[in-house]
Image: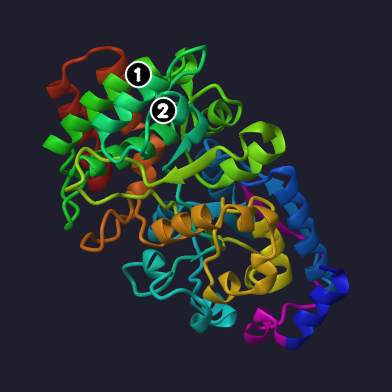
Amino acid sequence: MTRRTALGGLAAASAMAGLPRAARAQTAPLRWWSPQSSPAQAAAYEFQIEAFKAATGIDVVFERTSDEGYAPQLAAAFSSGEVPDVVTHLPSFAAQTYYANGLLEPFNDVIEAIGTEKYYEGANNVFLAEDGNYCATGIGNSAANMLWVRRDLMAEAGIDKIPETWDELRNAVSAMQKGGIYGAPLPYGVNSMTSLIFIGFIHQAGGQVFTPDLQVNLDNEGTRNALEFYKEMREYCPPGATNYSWGESLTAFVSGATATGIYTGRVLINVNDQNPPLADHITCATYPRMSTDIAPWTFNDFASVFIPAQSQNKEAAKQFAAFLFDPPGYIRQLHAAPGHVLPILRTISENPEYQDNAIIQKYSSEVDLMAASAANGFNLGYESPEHQSNSKAGEIIGSNIISEMVGRVVLNGDNVDEALSDASQAIEAIMAS
């Protein structure tokens, strides 16, 4: 895609057309924050920034945050008033929390400018706030807790099908753990990955953290069974898993150190770039659950784009936020990590230029599965279709209450009753604040 193509598409039908034009006299560049910034993604962002400047005369500066560090960074920005103008790739529950505290600009007019008819049906439901406004929109979907497997190691171990239940998973990783290869790279550190992945395990055991009307319900049989199984799995994870977060878990599988993985579709591009000998042996499935009677539960963080209410450049920020979905740039951004961030727009998924990608074509069944799983996925801010939206979810994840509970029970051997009681009380205190 050339710059000329991008600008031609913009002139023909830009998402910015439905928004007020920002003043050409603007001199201060817009500040764009995101924790997603691999070299390929950064190159895609630069393409979008240059095309936007050519069309509007407005500069944009990209500033990297981190998955684990965005909460204190944004807290400091909100406190000082020195906020970014556009933030992308943070989970929906973070956007809901910030909006509930009056920190975000309503996003309705940006969604309308992008084109509500272009979205998958219900794609913005997770961003609907209590006041009837949308706090953000999705920059993409992700299926963050897919089970990744090595078919070659399965064959060597005599395993003829991908595990669907916890018992099958435990037996499989036990059989494949040999020759310096561990069974799984589950996280056990006090961090967001452990919290978010373990919430998935609770649901995969038939439990939930909250009732549909948002009463704390952490102490249930599902959570207890999940803690027991998570403890059983520790012996099949590398010693360093005690401190694993997203990067370490991904690297463990991509490098060949573990027989299975738990991650999004970024596995595909990383394996092909960093460990090509594995490229023809990997595939994915929804993560196993305690019993096949329990429906799969896919964690989708609903990576978002939103605008801080304190931005001094709101109209320009809205123009840029809408422009991020202009097909040439948006497709390039998605292709930077094929299968990792999945299109939020139906029109992009159907676009031949999006489909024209070697990774997407080679792993079409895996990408299709992730897309379907993510579209029906959930997170702590949106535990099920019956649950109310939980604007406190971001604070709960940021507090590490759940990952600390896992560490107490699984690593330290603390009393389960006490750990569950302490975690429940801590979550109740956040809900009451």
Q: Are marks 2 and 1 in contact (CB under 8 Å)?
A: yes
| Callout 1 amino acid | Arg
Residue denoted by label 2: 186
The residues bearing labels 2 and 1 have C-alpha atoms spaced at a distance of: 8 Å
Q: Nearer the viewer, residue 349 or 72?
A: 349
Let me know if residue 168 appears in the view. yes
Name the secondary structure under disc 1.
helix
- The picture places residue 288, in percent across and down from the top left corner, at 31, 40
Residue at left 46%, top 19%?
Answer: 182
Give percent across and percent down for residue 187. Answer: 42, 27
In this picture, residue 196 sits left or right of residue 11: left
Q: Visible in this render: residue 326?
A: no
Query: Which residue type does callout 2 highlight?
Result: Leu
Instruction: Return the x and y of residue 223 as percentages of the image width and height.
Output: 19, 35
Q: Is residue 28 magenta?
A: yes
Q: Which residues are magenta?
A: 13-34
Relative height, residue 127 to residue 414 (above, below): below
The verdict on residue 333 being magenta is no
Q: Nearer the viewer, residue 304 or 200?
A: 200
Figure check: 334 above or below 427 = below
Which element is circle 2 on? Answer: loop
| Quadrant occupied by the N terminus | bottom right
For disc 1, the marked residue is 234
Residue 179 lies, with reference to residue 341, above or below; the image says: above
Vertical arrangement, residue 19 with respect to residue 205, above or below:
below
Considering only order in the chain, which callout, 1 or 2, is on the residue closer to the N terminus?
Answer: 2
Horizontal placement of 333 versus 410: left or right? right
Q: Residue at x 50, y 52 (%)?
A: 366
